[in-house]
Amino acid sequence: MGSWKGSDRIMQRIPKTPRRLLRALILLLAISVLAGPARADDAKSIKGFRAALVALGPDVDPAEAELVSVTSHTTARRLQKEWRVAPVSIYHNFLIHIGAREKGFCFDWAYGIGGELKKLPLKTLVLHWGASYPGTRLEHNCIVVTRPGQPFREGYIIDGWRAAGRLLWWPVKKDNYPWKEDLQETAWLQDPGPATRSGAAQARKSGSDDQTKAARGSHASSGLGAGSLE
């Protein structure tokens, strides 16, 4: 993607105290490492998501916002390649159902992207788990990011499933899913320990063989009208 203009703006805002200077430099280094593998056609979305996160509040660190945006986008593209994701999410769900693919349901994307985001040294942004129609065959899952103390519904969703690996993001309250916070999965996201996933969302979708088949079939048809803020 070439050089990151945002890095210059970040450096201008770096505090002069040694501890915060070191942390800012670490964040900047992480951004430069992650930015390389990002697809060129993701550049506009990465920039837009960063700006949206910064706009959540005056205390949001621009370096953290960029790190979250870059990590989310690059992880989605990596998983898209690793899981050999079909161009349309509906069809990819069908491939999983018949055994031609192993991963790529909504909870796989949330665990995959969330597992990378929870590794970041975030101080001015907070991760949450969003669940829509939890415990039913229509359940959908995503990651939500807010500033500290901000209500869940005031944050932004991070969804890799609907566009089959192209990251989608926009305000929770403007989405067509009735999102609620899954506190058990949120606890996993906010736990600074190992990134081993909790599995609660997947367990809800896999209560029995019949329930799993119904969940896979109906899940593929939900949320197709959503747009992107790219």
Image: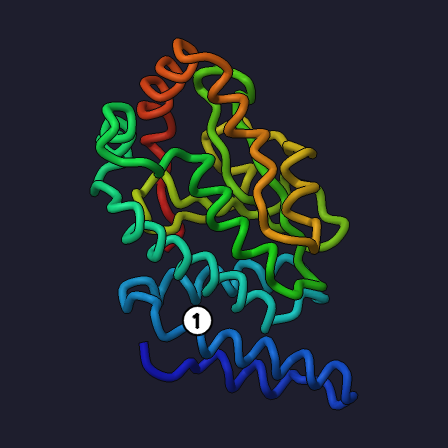
Q: Residue at x 37, y 13 (%)?
A: 214
Q: Nearer the viewer, residue 176 or 219?
A: 219
Q: Residue at x 68, y 34 (%)?
A: 184
Tell me the quarter of the image containing the C terminus: bottom left
Left or right side of 114 for 226: left
Total marks shown come to 1
Residue 102: name its quadrant: top left
Left or right side of 207 for 128: right
Local crowd size for mark 1, using a 10 Å CA cut-off: few (<14), some (14–19), many (≥20): some
Q: Amino acid at mark 1?
A: Leu
Tell me residue 57's x, y (percent): 68, 60
Q: Judge whether 68 appears above or below 143 on screen.
A: below
Q: Judge whether 129 appears above or below 35 on screen.
A: above
Left or right side of 27 for 85: left
Tell me residue 51's x, y (percent): 52, 64
Q: Nearer the viewer, residue 124 or 200?
A: 200
What is the image's colouring? Answer: rainbow
Tell me residue 209's x, y (percent): 40, 13
Q: Residue at x 61, y 83 (%)?
A: 25
Q: Nearer the viewer, residue 29 or 153?
A: 29
Q: Nearer the viewer, residue 39 or 13?
A: 39
Residue named by callout 1: 34
SS of the residue under disc 1: helix
